[in-house]
Amino acid sequence: MSKDEVFKEIKKPSDFKFNRTVVNVFDDMVNRSVPFYEEIQRMIAEQSASHAREGTAIYDLGCSTGTTFLSINPFVPPTVKFIGVDDSQEMLAKCDAKFKAACIERPYELVQADIAQPLQIEAASVVVMCLTLQFVRPLYRERLLKSVYEGLEPGGVVILVEKILAEESSFNRHFIDYYYEMKRRHHYTENEIAQKREALENVLIPYKLSENILLLKETGFSHHEIFFKWYNFAGIIAKK
């Protein structure tokens, strides 16, 4: 796993992009930047195992390097197809290489697509969006979740993990401070933290937890549960 040093040099940061430089260090980046990332992946795998059905598909929208699929793979029937969608061809190439290295035998398909654009989802029992919806412009989020809802089989679930805003703004600054302290513990410098924050400012647009839940309800999901919460990160599962 290559070490994330994307923002180590002092320079004027541009908007964050999932380019080749980021792809090469992505696995290290998320492990050091997302609280309890390995535990979140384990929880996604457990819940996918509970809801995956023979002959259906599991979609990962924003599949990046395929870590989520590799976590899920041992726990779901071999007839369940994996469909990974990402707009970065470099991410998909890394994902495919990891699948081949892990000797994935089930059917799978990796699709290059912008999930902010109209998306066709079919015969899905599980749709995962792990730290993905936050990068979709708010204008397109309802349409995307509607496509997810329509593409799920009855009883199917969407598993959503997001960076969020505090419900009460007075707590927001504290939660952000705690998050940056976590990044310091994971050996990011002050410069790296500041430069990545600036690069993400116009790209990652978080909602409150309540706003994400409302969006799920408005797109048709009648049941939901929060399965993970750490300051300004949350996981929600919602059922069709």
Image: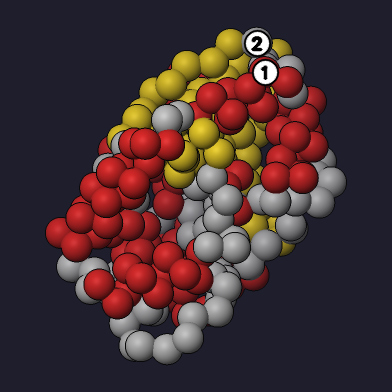
Q: What residue is at 19 percent from the left and 62 percent from the top? A: 184
Count how many numbered circles sit on residues in the image.
Answer: 2
User: Where is the N terminus found, in terms of image quarters?
Assistant: bottom left
Q: Is residue 68 left or right of residue 205?
A: left
Tell me, yes or no, whether the two marked residues, 2 and 1, touch with CB atoms within 8 Å. Answer: yes
Which of these two is toward me, 16 or 102? 16
Q: Percent position (x, y) of residue 49?
A: 45, 25
Q: What residue is at 63 percent from the left and 67 percent from the top? A: 88
Badge 2 or badge 1: first in the primary sequence: 1
Q: What residue is at 79 percent from the left and 37 percent from the top? A: 143
Identify the mark at residue 15; answer none if there is no mark.
none
Q: Is residue 34 left or right of residue 69?
A: left
Amino acid identity at mark 2? Ser
Sort mark 2 into few (<14), some (14-19) or many (20+) by Cα contacts within 10 Å.
few
Q: Percent position (x, y) of residue 124?
A: 68, 29
Which is more foreground, mark 2 or mark 1? 1
Amino acid identity at mark 1? Lys
Q: Is residue 42 left or right of residue 132?
A: left
Instruction: Examine the image and state in which quarter residue 19 appears.
Output: bottom right
Q: What residue is at 25 percent from the left and 72 percent from the top? A: 190
Instruction: Examine the image and state in which quarter residue 114 appears.
Output: bottom right
Task: Examine the rendered structure and indicate whether residue 228 appears above or below residue 223.
Answer: below
User: Where is the C terminus found, in terms of image quarters?
Assistant: top right
Task: Examine the rendered structure and indicate whether residue 164 appears above or below residue 219.
Answer: below
Residue topped by disc 2: 222
Identify the mark at residue 217; answer none if there is no mark.
1
Q: Percent position (x, y) of residue 165?
A: 46, 39
Task: Identify the element where label 2 is drawn.
Answer: loop
Q: Is residue 42 visible to us here? A: no
Measured Cα–Cα span from mark 2 to mark 1 = 6 Å
Determine the residue located farthest toward the left in the rendered image: 185
